[in-house]
Structure formats: C-alpha cells, structure tokens
C-alpha cells in the first residue's frame, strides 16, 4: 500500500470511528435526542427531509460561491496593488487588518439595513469574510519575489507589467491556492451566518427554524450538510492546486518517494 493510500484509509477509518463512537455513547449513556441525536437518526432525517432541504442547499451554495467569487476578484486586485507597491502596503495594510478584525456578525445588520433581508446580505457577508486571506497571500507572494530576478529582467528590458505577469503572478500561485482553501470555508461561515439572521432561505435559516422548534436532529443534519459541502469545495481547490502549482511541490514529492 502506497503512502497516499494508507493516509486515505487512516482518514476514512478515523471518520467512521468518530461516528460509531458517537452512536455507541449515545446509546450506552441513554442521551436524549433533544440534547444529542444519534448519527443514525441524523441520517434518517437527512434522507426523509432531503426534498425539502434541497432548495435550501442550493441557496446556500449559490450565496457562498457568488460571494466567494466577488471576494476573490476584489482580493486579487487589492493584493496585487498592495504587493507591488511599498507605499500602498504601508498605507493600506493597517486598514485591511483593522477591517478584518471586525466581527462579521456585526456587519450583517448593516447589510440588512442597506439591502434588506434575503440573498444580498448573505452574498456580501461571504464576500467580506474571504477578502482578507486572499489579499494577504497575494501580497506576500509578490513581496517574496527575488529582487535580483527583477533586476535581471529589468536589465533585459522587461517592463513592470511584464515582470508582474510573467514572474510575479506565477510565483504567487501556491500562496493564492492556499488562500482559496481558507477563503471558501470562511465564505460558508459568512453565508450561513447571514442566513440565520436575515433570510428565509438557506441551510442557516433551516437550522435556526429547527432550533426554535426543538428539531435537534434537523439542526445536526444542517451541520453535516454544510460540512460535506465545505469538504467537497476544499477538495476541488486542493485538486486544482496540485494541477496548477505542482512545480512548487515537485521537489518535496521527489524527496518523499
């Protein structure tokens, strides 16, 4: 068995063991379903309520991906500006840090006040929460480009835009994809957070409504659905990262084998 296969087996075993332990402890300790439902009950709830949950899943996925796309676009633009200019870095970076430090739950009421309840606040919250990781990683990637390499290219007659396009941006790809994996999970947090406060659609709204009606198994079903969607999107960006930035880890792969 190869090392990647062994890791996958161990990871699957850990997940299965976690849910089996959960099931056994709930039965052995006679835990009430109103406190902690068993995984088997949660699966039954997911299966029986799936036709009802499906539109909410699509709504949460749409809000997350739309906000994520906007956040990535803005983050890349700001990251390039901040990373290629020392003045912009010194001026804008403290503002970005301060803005990212604001609890995102505090901006949801503002978005509701400006745009009303519904999809727009969820999209904007997902966008805002994922901008900062993109900006930081793009700026870091550009800042780590060797000055000697830039000097050589300038000597050969390359312009700043050519250096950025042919050297700077390709060198930031490992940083960029690392930030995407973080940003997509944060986008889910932002979208669901907004749905619990200011929406009548989405998994966040389902979980809030189910909680108020003491449907605890449905609340946990929503959590598992969110976890599955987050893992699936994380896996997609991990796959793209390996395909696009394989050159950055090729040396490590050779060393491992």
Image (tube, grey):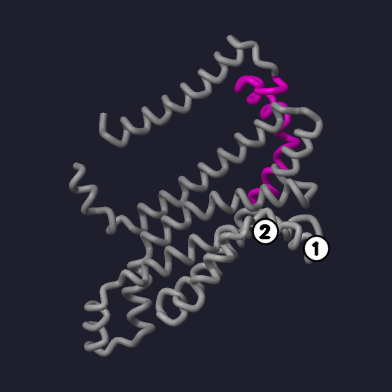
Number of numbered tags placed on the structure image: 2
The vertical placement of 141 against 207, above or below, is below
Q: Magenta stretch containing residue 37, yes or no?
A: yes
Label 1 or label 2, whichever comes before in sequence order: 1
| Residue at point 45%, 52% (across, down) | 237
* Residue 108 horizontal/vertical position (percent): 72, 57
- Identify residue for label 1: 113
The vertical placement of 56 against 10, above or below, is below
Q: Does dot 2 land on a helix, a strand or a loop?
A: helix
When asked about the image quadrant of residue 102, the answer is bottom right
* Residue 61 horizontal/vertical position (percent): 64, 49
Q: Does dot 1 land on a helix, a strand or a loop?
A: helix
What is the number of the mark on residue 123?
A: 2
Which residue occupies the foreground of this view, 120 or 131?
131
From mark 1 to mark 2, how far is it between C-alphas?
Answer: 15 Å
* Residue 194 horizontal/vertical position (percent): 71, 52
The vertical placement of 136 against 122, above or below, is below
| Residue at point 41%, 54% (across, down) | 240
Our reading of the magenta stretch's main secondary structure is helix
The vertical placement of 243 against 37, above or below, is below
Quadrant (top left/top right/bottom left/bottom right) for the N terminus = top left
Which residue occupies the foreground of this view, 99 or 67?
99
When asked about the image quadrant of residue 130, the answer is bottom right
Start and end of the magenta stretch?
33-61
Q: Is residue 207 left or right of residue 168?
A: right
* Residue 177 horizontal/vertical position (percent): 42, 57
């Amino acid at each position: 068995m190869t090392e990647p296969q062994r890791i996958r087996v161990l990871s699957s075993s850990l997940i299965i063991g976690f849910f089996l332990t959960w099931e056994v402890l709930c039965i052995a300790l006679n835990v009430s379903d109103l406190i902690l439902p068993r995984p088997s009950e949660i699966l039954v709830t997911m299966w029986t309520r799936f036709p009802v949950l499906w539109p909410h899943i699509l709504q949460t996925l749409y809000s997350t991906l739309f906000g994520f796309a906007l956040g990535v676009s803005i983050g890349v633009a700001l990251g390039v500006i901040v990373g290629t200019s020392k003045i912009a870095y010194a001026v804008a970076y403290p503002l970005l840090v301060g803005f990212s430090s604001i609890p995102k739950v505090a901006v949801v009421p503002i978005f509701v006040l400006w745009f009303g309840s519904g999809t727009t606040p969820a999209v904007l919250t997902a966008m805002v929460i994922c901008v900062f990781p993109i900006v930081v990683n793009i700026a870091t990637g550009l800042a780590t480009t060797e000055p000697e390499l830039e000097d050589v290219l300038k000597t050969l007659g390359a312009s700043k835009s050519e250096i950025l396009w042919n050297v700077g941006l390709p060198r930031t790809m490992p940083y960029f994809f690392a930030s995407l994996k973080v940003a997509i999970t944060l986008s889910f947090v932002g979208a669901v957070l907004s749905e619990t406060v200011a929406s009548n659609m989405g998994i966040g709204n389902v979980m809030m409504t189910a909680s108020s009606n003491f449907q605890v198994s449905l609340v946990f079903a929503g959590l598992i659905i969110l976890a599955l969607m987050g893992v699936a999107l994380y896996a997609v960006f991990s796959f793209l990262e390996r395909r696009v930035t394989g050159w950055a880890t090729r040396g490590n792969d050779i060393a491992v084998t």
